[in-house]
């Protein structure tokens, strides 16, 4: 939580929903899909399947779950359905989870890579800039 604009208290009804979000994002394929959509902004099922190395029918099922959770949106382009991230929030959760994973695998006394000053490049080890995910129009 950010101390500058949020309190440490969360409304009880959002705790269960937050657990559902974390559960939905706990799948490696879904994480890869969200990262792919961030990198390319908008992709079809076939393109996403290629990027994540999975079959299109499986990717389509993952995308359906992400769409029901309103993490991705679609638009029709001729016969193709293109997917894009609905906002930056899922991406932010993934970035934080990766940073936490770096803490989990760092040896005792070792500084995780995202805490290590870089060579002037702001790209974190996992390819995500040390920033909040980019804003898209209509985000809140």
Image (cartoon, rainbow, N blue to C red):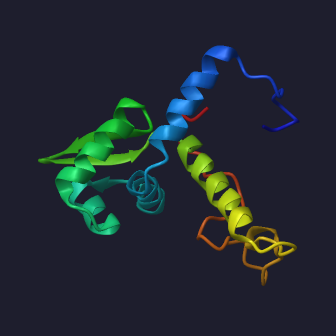
Q: Residue furthest bottom?
A: 119
Q: Is residue 43 above or below residue 1?
A: below
Tell me where residue 16 sits by quadrant: top right
Residue at x 48% of width, y 56% of height: 38
**The C terminus lies in quadrant:** top right
- Residue 45 placement, left or right of 16: left
Q: Which residue is at a point 39% across and 55% down the rendered structure image?
A: 33
- In depth, the one of 108 and 36 nearer the eye is 108
- Residue 116 horizontal/vertical position (percent): 82, 75
- Which quarter shows the N terminus? top right
Q: Position of residue 136 (x, y in %)?
A: 54, 44
Q: Is residue 140 above or below residue 123?
A: above
In the displayed structure image, the side of residue 138 where residue 121 appears, left or right: right
The residue furthest left is 79
Q: Residue at x 23, y 52 (%)?
A: 58
Q: Residue at x 78, y 84 (%)?
A: 119
Q: Residue 45 falls in which quadrant of the image?
A: bottom left
């Amino acid at each position: 939580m950010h101390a500058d604009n949020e309190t440490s208290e969360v409304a009880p009804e959002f705790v269960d929903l937050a657990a559902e979000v974390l559960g939905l994002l706990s799948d490696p394929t879904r994480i890869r899909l969200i990262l792919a959509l961030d990198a390319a902004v908008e992709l079809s099922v076939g393109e996403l399947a290629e990027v994540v190395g999975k079959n299109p029918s499986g990717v389509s099922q993952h995308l359906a779950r992400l769409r029901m959770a309103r993490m991705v949106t679609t638009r029709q382009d001729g016969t193709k359905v293109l997917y894009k991230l609905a906002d930056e929030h899922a991406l932010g959760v993934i970035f934080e989870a990766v940073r936490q994973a770096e803490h989990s695998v760092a040896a005792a006394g070792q500084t995780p890579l995202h805490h290590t000053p870089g060579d002037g490049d702001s790209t974190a080890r996992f390819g995500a800039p040390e920033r909040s995910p980019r804003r898209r129009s209509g985000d809140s």
